[in-house]
Image: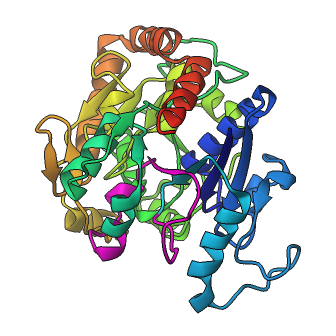
Amino acid sequence: MKRLHIIKLDGLAGTEKMLIQFVNSNMPDGDEDKILNINNELSHHLSGHLPENKIIFPYRIFKNHMLKYPAFMRKYILRRAIEKENPDLIIVWDLIPNWDTRPSCGKIVYYDHGNSWFFTKNTKTLNFFSIVDGCISASFASQRILQLKFNLKCPILTVSNNIPHPYRIKTLRNISEKQIILGTASRLEPIKAVGVSVLTTMELNRRGIDTKLYIAGHGSQEAGLKKLVKKLGLADKVIFLGFQKDMSDFYQLIDFYISSPITEAFGLSCMEALYNGIPVIFPMIDGQPEVIKHKYSGLGYIPTMSLDRYFKLTGLEVNYSHQGYSPAEDKMVDLKVPSYIDYANGIENIIKENSYLQYSNNAKKYTREQCDYKQFNYLLKEKFSSFL
């Protein structure tokens, strides 16, 4: 079988990591995977992760040059590039393709990793979904967004995300009475609301709990976050690590993982934290509760802070107009930011109850029992093939 993956390779976030793992894991199996990168270049963060002979740049006029076809031609060019490869299966990763008409070959499967939250319900989006043969969602929340927001009638199969076992795992240890260390790893973009981690660090120190925060990642709000840290007098408490190619060192450093996005389809970094026995503090929205079990491997809180309040406290805008999914109510809801007071209360309670090691052991137990990447990869291939 020949699979053609359509994706925008412009960074190394969760979706790109999933593609890399899938393609590299299945190379020995005899099936052929090709990647049609609608970004005209390959992010330097992705260099060396994928075989170059598997990547196609459809919008380049010449294979090894950056010169692109004019915009008005790209719909036709994209479709022709797909038909030239003649795949059995066209897998569209987290985007709406801009083609002139349905390609004449292959079954089309849309694979959602969270961008369905951002898609506008317009003619282009609905036309695309009307021609797909089915969808695969990375979480139950993702499936419900597709159903509730776009009223899809095609088959939607849920294959919960998974990651390969990290090669190096943190040794369990109780938290120090002298200092605790928080960590967050994500793109430093508005939707991630990383300012909540900074405010939580401020609040815990205000309560007399010596707390440091490590932030891994880059993004458009990095300067704003550094400005906030300086304003709050936390320059010696908050350390910006930048992009981390190897995350194992990051997880060795931290005691709690802080997840604070206003919307999150699944949460791969949270799963990495659980592998390392690190309790996760998280918002009870979208797919987050599917990864972390409340009061078992972490603590979840329904977000209560308005976007305006978050801006007043941090100077960081979110600018997000779409709705999210409430697992508790099984409906679309307006989104808010998790409360740093809730987060600080939860961490303080774990310290006072001396229950940190129990949370850590539970986190590792969860990954031993629930996280099997080989089984996930087998199931995903099986679901893909079911559309043929």
Q: Is residue 164 above or below residue 323?
A: above
Whole-percent x, y for residue 39 in the image: 66, 70
On screen, residue 283 versus residue 185, left or right, reads left
In this view, the residue in front, 59 or 142, is 59
Count of numbered badges drawn on the protein: 0
Most extreme residue toward the left is 329
On screen, residue 295 versus residue 41, left or right, reads left
The quadrant holding residue 191 is: bottom left
- Residue 182 appears in the rendering: no
* Residue in the picture at 85% in, 54% down: 52
* Residue in the picture at 49% in, 67% down: 102
On screen, residue 342 versus residue 129, left or right, reads left
Whole-percent x, y for residue 219 in the image: 56, 64
Q: Is 108 contained in the magenta span?
A: yes
Q: Which residues are magenta?
A: 96-125
In this view, the residue in front, 173 or 289, is 289
In this view, the residue in front, 372 or 381, is 381
On screen, residue 155 versus residue 57, left or right, reads left
The quadrant holding residue 313 is: bottom left
Query: Image quadrant for the N terminus?
Result: top right
**Taken as a whole, is the magenta stretch helix, strand or loop?**
loop
The quadrant holding residue 296 is: top left
Most extreme residue toward the right is 64
Q: Is residue 20 above or below residue 231?
A: above
In this view, the residue in front, 36 or 336, is 36
Whole-percent x, y for residue 274 in the image: 49, 23
* Residue in the picture at 36% in, 11% down: 355
Q: Is 216 contained in the magenta span?
A: no
Whole-percent x, y for residue 305 in the image: 19, 54
* Residue in the picture at 60% in, 58% down: 7
- Residue 209 appears in the rendering: yes
Q: Is residue 87 above or below residue 213?
A: below
